[in-house]
Each structure stands twice: as C-alpha cells, then as structure tokens.
Amino acid sequence: MGADMPRTDANLERWSRIAAASSGFDPALFAKYDVKRGLRDESGRGVVAGLTQVGDVIGYSTDTGTSHPAPGELLYRGIEITDIVEGFTAAGRQGFEEIAYLLLFGQLPDSAELAEFEGTLGSYRKLPRSFVHHAILDMPSNDVMNALARSVLSLYTLDKKAEDTSISNVLRQSLHLIAKLPMLSVYAYQAYLDDVHGQSLVIHRPKPELSTAENFLHMLRPDSSFTELEAMLLDLSLVVHAEHGGGNNSTFTTHVVTSTGTDTYSVISAALGSLKGPRHGGANIKAIQMLEDLKGRIGDWHDEDAIDAYLTGVLNKERFDKAGLIYGMGHPVYSISDPRALILKHYAEMLAREKGLTEEFELYERVERIAPETIARVRTMHKGVSVNVDFYSGFVYRMLGIPEELFTPLFAISRVVGWAAHRIEELATGGKIIRPAYKAVAPRREYVAMEGREPVEG
C-alpha cells in the first residue's frame, strides 16, 4: 500500500464529484432498453413481480375490457377495508388486533380466538430491564427509526432460535415484534428527548390488558391519560396502515430479503430502513410540515386564490422544501380516491371538533380540493390525482399530541403486521432468491497498468 493520505474535506469533496460523474448516464437509455424504472410502466402502474393473498390495492377497473381509473379499494385477505372498519366500529371495539389476526391467519377471529390472540400479544410485551437500558436508553439516536431498526436487530441476541426459519418459529418471532415495537419506539423517543433535549425520562411499562393503540398512548404520555376517541382514532390509523399489497417498497423489501433465507430480525430491520425514507413512510411528516408552512404564509385560510398560488409555488420548486412535490397528494395506484384517506378524514373531523380545531380541518379540506386542480394545470399527468393517507394521518397524529419523531415509527408499529404476513407467505410459497435483471451500459475497457494511468479529473 502507498503512503497514508489524509482524509480531508477537500479530498471527500473531490471524490464525491468523481463518484457522481462516473455514476450517471444518459436517461434516454431507460427508454432504449425498455427499462421499467422503479418496477413501473409508463403510466405508473407496478410491474407484476409476485403473487399474494395477504392484501390487494385496486385503483383501476377493467369491467369494460379496458383499464380505467376507479375509486380506490384496499382489501385485507379479500375483505374491503371499509367493511372491516364499519364492522368493528359498529360493534364499539377497536380493530387493530382483529385485523392482525386476519392478515396473519387468513380469517377473522371469533370472540374466543380474538381474546386468546390479544392475551398472547399482551404477554409478549415484556422486555428485560437490561435490554431496555443497554440497547435503547444507553444508545440514543437522533432518529427513532434508526434506533428502532437497531433494537430489532438487538432482539436477535435474546432469541435462542433466531436463525430458525420454520413457519411456526417465524410466527412466534412475528408476534413478539408486533407486541414489542410500540415499546421500542416510545422508549427510543424517550432516550432521544433525554439525550438531545435534556428532558427527564418518563418510562411507563406496558399494560397487558390495554390494546396496542391504548398502550402506545399510555407509554407516551407522562400522565398515561387518553380519551376513548383518541384511542379509537389511533387504532384506526394502525388498521389502515397495516397492509398495502406486496408491491409497496418496504413489503417488497420484506419479500426480497426473506428470499435470501436470512433471519426474521434482519428482514424486519431491512423493511424499517425502507419505510424510513421520506418517499415512503416519512411522507406524512412532509405533508404536515408543508401545511404548517402554508399557514405561515397565508393570512386568510379561506382565500382559495392564495392557496392555489402557494401550491403552484411548491410545484415550481419555489416554496416549502423546493422539491416540487405537494406532499399527501397522489399515489402510484390510487387516482380517484384513497380509501384509507377517506376513513381517516371522517374520524379526523370528529377529533378536530373535540380539540377545537375545526377551522384547521377545513383548511385541509380546501387544500385537498384545490391541489388536484393546481397539479393538473401545472403538470402533465398520465392519471388523476387524489389525496392519499399521508395527508390526514399527520394531522391526526398532531391532534393526538404525537411528536413528528414518532410519525414513521407508528407506521412501522402497524405495518409490521403486513410484513410478517408477507414474510410467512414468501417462506411458504417461495424457493428462489429474488434477483431482477439490470442492463449494463458501461462500455468495455482495457485494464491499464499503474504507470500508464492518467489522473482522474474532479
């Protein structure tokens, strides 16, 4: 090896330019080789890469022989999400544990089965005190999702059968993760508050008799108090985020990593890394930040021309984060409506009235109505645009007093159910490692000996 070279900021800057220059190529090559970028066709619909019985996302109808946009549907094991929600809310009960059972086992539980399942999750919520201190509290992170992924990997060390990929063992591991993710998330957030903001730690142990939503609010709030409506709305949010077909990024990640034969903790950690991204699970944070920015720039929330002008500025990369995106609007599958958004919107209005935030809710409604018209005027679109679940979920979380640092972890607390169901499905029906093809477009070159090489410009 040659003499040590100091790793200065100047070197890193130069190497970054070289790396960027050597990594790019003409985007026209994607069309030349008919590459489905993002595993999507030109209209934005996903390339079929697998089969699943767990969930289905429908945004198009083919009843007339041709495909055309239709009101969105989300099915859990073949049952429409709106029917599921209407079923358990009409009976006056929360639904997250019920749909977790449905997604994992393929059928709705009867009262005895549900009680047994809830009892199992309650008993699995315990964590060793030493694990809480050493794996979470003593290792704070500025990002709760990173802390959550690390904690999930650390659970490997507590599992004597961590590498066993039999269905029965993976199911056991999955139930433990479904039960423990709320604790891991809240405790990681408490460690963050202590380390970054110097706030006192407030650690509540979970209560086995409480639901997942109730336990989350109990552990998060210093006084452990919450209203029935607050718990119901958080439960609903968990229900509508639990599953979204096999093609969303984090669930596809689950299938991909499961197909390698690795352990459950590595799979779920990889899925958490996917969900963290602002284009996936982090979008609701961007949506609420965008609305806060809008509120600060518009004096009259009823001025629709001002709202349109702001949204036009966002699309033209002149407002908010200058990324050119109206967060909470549009979806790869849904074009007319997102059923999850419709469900959350209905109950968000109820909570807004209880919290005295009706005017703010009405502002959200105006943006929901105006944004598609603004997008249609400014952009060329292949399909319609409607509000998605991220638009209202962030508003719901803020009304519940949930900090932004926990928005995406809450998504994970819910979606781990879908990930577990898809992991089991991949193990039961797979057999081949998932390995899509990439077309190499680099020209062939000859190896050049050291003495004949030219310095790289950068």
Image (tube, rainbow, N blue to C red):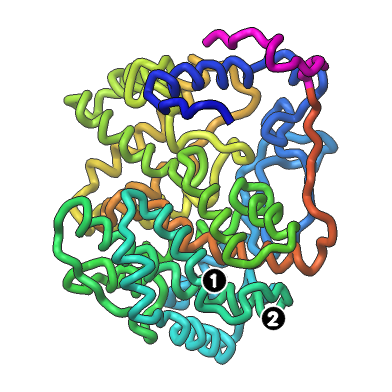
Which segment is the magenta one?
A: 441-458
Q: Which mark is residue 168?
A: 2
Residue type, numbered disc 1: Tyr
Instruction: Say few, some or many: other residues with alpha carbon within 10 Å of mark 2 (under 14 / 14 to 19 / 20 or more).
Output: few
Percent position (x, y) of residue 25? 67, 15
- Residue located 52% across and 11% down the image: 458
| Residue 352 in view in this figure | yes
Image vertical order of residue 358 relative to residue 205, above or below: above
Q: Quadrant of the N terminus?
A: top right
In this view, 384 is above or below 30: below
x and y percentages locating residue 284 in the rendered image: 41, 44
Quadrant hosting residue 380? top right
- Determine the residue positioned at 60% across, 21% down: 381
The one of 354 and 412 positioned closer to us in this rendering: 412
Quarter where residue 77 is shown: bottom right
Tell me whether circle 1 and circle 2 mark residues in contact (CB < 8 Å). Answer: no
Tell which tag, 1 or 2, sits nearer the viewer: 1
Q: Earlier in the sequence, mark 1 or mark 2?
A: 1
Question: Residue at the spot x=68%, y=11% of the render?
Answer: 453
Q: Is residue 387 magenta?
A: no
Rounded to the nearest angstrom, the CA distance separating label 1 from label 2 is: 17 Å
**In magenta stretch: residue 442:** yes
Q: Determine whether, in the image, residue 424 is placed left or right of residue 346.
A: right
